[in-house]
Image: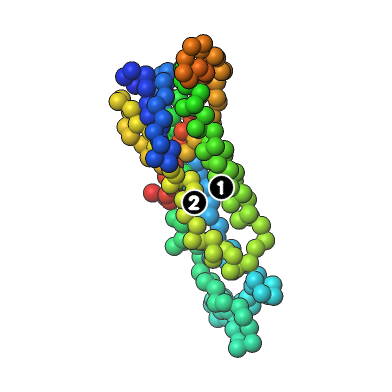
Amino acid sequence: MSILPRGSQIVLTIADTPLTLFVDELKDSYTTQAFERPEFSYHRLLQAPNQVDGSMPVIVYGFGNVPTQITSTCSSIAPRVLTADDPVIPEILQRKNIHQYEIPLIENLAATVDAIPATARQHSLFLARFEADMKKRSEYVSYEQLLAWQAENFSYLTSTNVSISGVQIPSESNCLIVNFQRGVAVEVPGSVQNVILKGGSITLQIITIESAIN
């Protein structure tokens, strides 16, 4: 959907500092991205080695082919869940709900726009961190590490210090800057702040995470 805020202005607030930006027609869209959290899988936890010595649980099958874990006082192997993943499927299958704003900039003071890049760089690292968080879950890691990852809520994506507001757009908080283009610097002789930026753009995403089963 395209939105043209009245007066072609929006207020981008970074860490309690409001920045008034002159913008062109905004576009917002909604998408979802599925991902998995295998650290909740009983099957994956059953196959994970002990962190201390790399030992694995010993499973035997008794009458009716019912699995049983053998434990002893000399073993440091924690008891594992031996049933199927059915109860934890909602935790394993997750999705990111993404509300995105594409915001073309028109003419803005360089001093205003130049308050954005540092946060944009930080947010690009958050996006890279999420990719790494997904990849490391496919590595050969310990049972204890998988349990520790269960506490991750990816708040670095969903809770940020950036918000946006405007007359014809809803106030949005916890925005992630996923793309930023500075624009072309133009000198304005005789002006106190004599450099403006023509063009450029900023793309924001508001991300929430929930079970893909919902």
Which residue type does callout 2 highlight? Phe
Label for residue 130?
A: 1
Residue 204: image x %, image y %? 46, 33
Which residue type does callout 1 highlight? Phe
Q: Nearer the viewer, residue 171 or 205?
A: 171
Looking at the rendering, which quadrant does residue 167 occupy? top left
Q: Distance between the residues labelled 2 and 1?
A: 8 Å
Q: Measured along the vertical axis of the image, is residue 138 above or below residue 59?
A: above
Q: Mark 2 points at which residue?
A: 154
Q: Measured along the vertical axis of the image, is residue 212 above or below residue 27?
A: below
Which residue, as the protein is rendered here, is positioned at the far top? Answer: 189
Say if mark 2 contacts mark 1, CB within 8 Å. Answer: yes
* Residue at screen point 63% across, 83% down: 75
Q: Measured along the vertical axis of the image, is residue 164 above or below residue 89?
A: above
Q: Is residue 126 left or right of residue 211?
A: right
For disc 1, the neighbor class at 10 Å (few under 14, some 14 to 19, many from 20) is few
> In which quadrant will I find the N terminus?
top left
Residue 55: image x %, image y %? 68, 75
Label for residue 211?
A: none
Q: Is residue 136 left or right of residue 103?
A: right
Q: In this view, does 12 lie to the left or right of 147?
A: left
